Amino acid sequence: MAFDVIVVGGGPAGLTAALYTARSGWKVIVLDPMGGGGQAATTDVIHNYPGFPQGIKGLELMELMAEHARGFGALIETDEVEKVSLGDAGFSVSGQASTYESSAVIYCAGTSPRRLNVPGEDRLIGKGVSFCATCDGPLFSGKRVAVVGGGDSALTEAQFLARLASQVILIHRRDEFRAGLYNQKMVRENPKILSCMNSVVDEIHGERYVEAVTVRNVKTGEVNKEPVSAVFLYVGSSPNTAPVVDLVETDDSGYILTGPDMSTKTPGLYAAGDVRRKPLRQVSTAVGDGATAAFAAETYLMGRAV
Ligand code: NAP
């Protein structure tokens, strides 16, 4: 299947890139392992995307972005991309379901959640260990749950879970949160969130389902076994760069280095959104990246055509 532009990843960066390129008349396909939406679709309510003063559900926003891109003719397919390589037409993109050819690729594969690598974690994933409060939180209504992490994701999702759970223990390894001041204030003022600072999880316990976590205070050495029914892990993310690793340069953390126009070291290959090195990872910045990458890709395609 041949296209002008293949967009890898259907989060806010990818769907915006697809919208812009499709609107200009290029033949565009978006490939996404989940059919689109990205991590934004798993966020309960997004409060800082301009134009929605009451906030908007992450899933609803992403469905609107997909509808918008489709409205201009972009195809959105469910396929997990395994490799992007240089091919006869420009690029060859191998997915689990099919192989696609294109003149340009806009790579927006985002990030995947990091793990704690503690005993019990792998065994209890899907049995109380979760990376998505929006998806799994309602299963623990009225129960005591733990959230691990000190960034905006942990604090945002702790607030969401506090609406359902009897209590949320927020476990963070340092004495101050990494999250922005707004989320810190909201967490401080929430009577259902108990912050355990300077604390790490050493083990997740449970026979068939999560029953408790061992929490160790790294300053005092005190160890407590806290009874919880679920553990939500928000300890950061790693960029999903494996399919393009030979075609791009990355920083020490693996994020793709781009020019201001989202170009990579390979002509015709652009990277946008959370997967690239940037100071702020938000839906609003991903949208900007997607539009910029689309503009650059179009310029590249027109250059090739003349
Ligand atoms: P993040 O900002 O990288 O925070 C990860 C947190 O996990 C940090 O507090 C870190 O601790 C902790 N951590 C990392 N490894 C750990 C380990 N092995 N054990 C225990 N704790 C560990 O990630 P994020 O919260 O997912 O946010 C990612 C980006 O999205 C950020 O730019 C964030 O601002 C943005 N975001 C924004 C919003 C919003 O504005 N509403 C919502 C969600 C995400 P240290 O602090 O000690 O390093």
Image (tube, grey):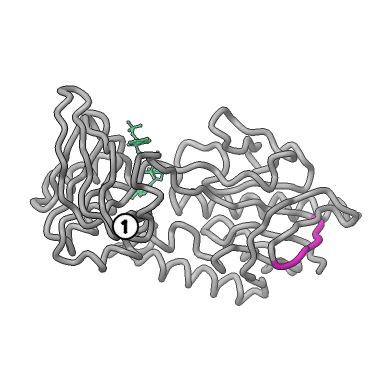
Image point (74%, 51%), residue name: 84
Task: Classify mark 1: residues with Cα within 10 Å, few (<14), some (14-19) or many (20+).
Answer: some
- Label 1 residue near ligand 1, CB within 8 Å: yes
Residue 19 vertical placement versus 289 (above, below): below
Residue 240 vertical placement versus 21 (above, below): above
What percent of the width, then of the height, locates residue 28? 71, 66
Ligand 1's quadrant is top left
Q: Is the magenta stretch mostly helix, strand or loop?
A: strand
What percent of the width, then of the height, locates residue 96? 69, 63
What percent of the width, then of the height, locates residue 180? 29, 40
Based on the displayed image, in which of its 4 quarters is residue 226 positioned? top left
Image point (21%, 54%), residue name: 211
Residue pushed farthest left? 191
| SS class, disc 1 | loop
Q: Which quarter shows the N terminus? A: bottom right
What percent of the width, then of the height, locates residue 228? 19, 53
Image point (57%, 37%), residue name: 255
Image point (56%, 28%), residue name: 252
- Foreground of the two, 214 or 252: 214
Q: What residue type is labelled 1?
A: His
Residue 218 vertical placement versus 149 (above, below): above
- Foreground of the two, 123 or 249: 123
Based on the displayed image, in which of its 4 quarters is residue 98 positioned? bottom right
Residue 82 vertical placement versus 199 (above, below): below
The residue wearing badge 1 is: 47
In the image, residue 260 lies in the stretch drawn in magenta:
no
- Which portion, as a residue range, is magenta? 97-103
Q: In this view, does 226 lie to the left or right of 301?
A: left
